[in-house]
């Protein structure tokens, strides 16, 4: 997994761990993209993920690069996870 962007996000820089759940990342992506990240995107290679991001940018973010969008998604996803409890219906 370390060769995927998801692996890099989970591992973090400098060996630190980011515990943000991928469900929060998928949800947060909808604030910046015209289509939320699909569940299987967790296993995509970095190039495929970057292409998806750049192909689905919302208009206000169309001049941002993939790394900037990832930063926005990670910050929002982490904030959602820290501040909200999602209840799953079973």
Image (tube, helix red, strand yellow):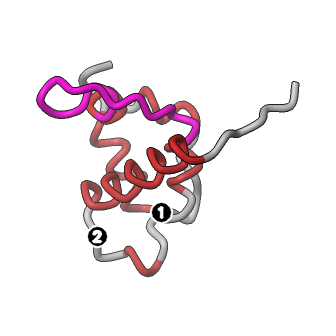
- Residue tagged 1: 56
Q: Does residue 11 belong to the magenta stretch?
A: yes
Q: Is residue 2 left or right of residue 73?
A: left
Q: How many marks?
A: 2
Look at the image and say whether residue 45 sits in the magenta stretch.
no
Which SS class for mark 1? loop
**Quadrant where the N terminus is found in the figure:** top left
Residue 64 tag number: 2
Q: Quadrant of residue 3?
A: top left
Left or right, residue 42 beside residue 54: right
Span shown in magenta: 9-24
Secondary structure of residue under mark 2: loop
Percent position of residue 55, x then y: 42, 62
Q: Position of residue 69 (x, y in %)?
A: 34, 59
Q: Is residue 87 above or below residue 76?
A: above
Q: Residues within 10 Å of mark 2 (few under 14, many from 20)?
A: few
In this rendering, position of residue 7 left or right of residue 86: left
Q: Residue at x 88, y 24 (%)?
A: 90
CB contact under 8 Å: marks 1 and 2? no
User: Is 67 above or below relative to 38?
Assistant: below
Tell me residue 71's x, y (percent).
Answer: 31, 54
Pick the front one: 89 or 46: 89
- Seen at 36% across and 32% down, the residue is 6
Residue farthest toward the front in the current orientation of the protein: 83
Compared with 66, 13 (above or below) is above
């Amino acid at each position: 997994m370390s060769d995927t962007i998801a692996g890099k996000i989970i591992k973090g820089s400098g060996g630190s761990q980011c515990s943000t759940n991928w469900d929060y990342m998928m949800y947060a992506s909808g604030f910046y993209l015209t289509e939320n990240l699909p569940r299987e995107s967790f296993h995509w290679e970095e190039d495929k993920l970057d292409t998806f991001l750049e192909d689905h940018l919302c208009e206000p973010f169309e001049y941002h690069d993939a790394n900037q969008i990832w930063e926005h998604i990670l910050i929002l996803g982490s904030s959602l996870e820290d501040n909200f409890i999602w209840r799953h219906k079973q």
